[in-house]
Image: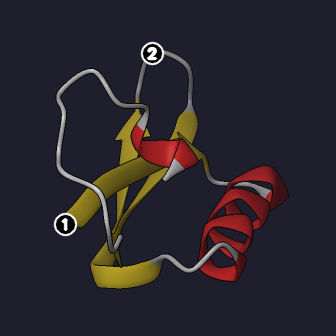
């Protein structure tokens, strides 16, 4: 099965660490990162899609995608 996640967070080192952790767990980048500005908080937010092929499992909507 192929699994998709969209990681989001503030534009800071913690977001980069989350993406790096996902890459080291076998996830692959999917598409370009995105940035958005929250005018109410004055904060930039990042997003990055990642995908992973998991062999020997079937998709279940109740599964925790980050644990695959």
Q: Nearer the viewer, residue 12 or 67?
A: 67
Q: Disc 2 marks which residue?
A: 40
**Mark 2 to mark 1: distance in Å?**
39 Å
Q: Secondary structure at mark 2?
A: loop
> Residue 30 appears at what percent x and percent y?
28, 81
> Residue 54 appears at what percent x and percent y?
35, 70
Q: Is residue 2 left or right of residue 22?
A: left
Question: Along the polypeptide, which appears first: circle 2 or circle 1?
Answer: 1
When the figure is inspected, residue 32 is found, relative to residue 9, above or below; the finding is below
- Where residue 58 is drawn, which disc sits there? none
Q: Is residue 22 left or right of residue 62?
A: right
* Quarter assignment of residue 31: bottom left
Q: Is residue 3 left or right of residue 61?
A: right
> Residue 40 appears at what percent x and percent y?
45, 15
> Residue 15 appears at what percent x and percent y?
68, 55
* Quarter assignment of residue 16: bottom right
Q: Disc 1 marks which residue?
A: 1
Q: Nearer the viewer, residue 15 or 64?
A: 64
Instruction: Name the residue located 82 percent from the left edge and 60 percent from the top edge.
Output: 13
Label 1, residues with CA under 10 Å away: few <14, some 14-19, many ≥20: few
Q: How many marks?
A: 2
């Amino acid at each position: 099965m192929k699994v998709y996640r969209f990681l989001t967070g503030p534009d800071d080192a913690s977001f980069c660490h989350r993406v790096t952790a996902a890459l080291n767990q076998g996830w692959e980048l999917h598409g370009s990162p995105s940035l958005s500005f929250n005018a109410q908080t004055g904060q930039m937010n990042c997003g990055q899609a990642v995908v992973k092929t998991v062999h020997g499992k079937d998709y279940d909507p109740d599964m925790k995608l980050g644990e695959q």
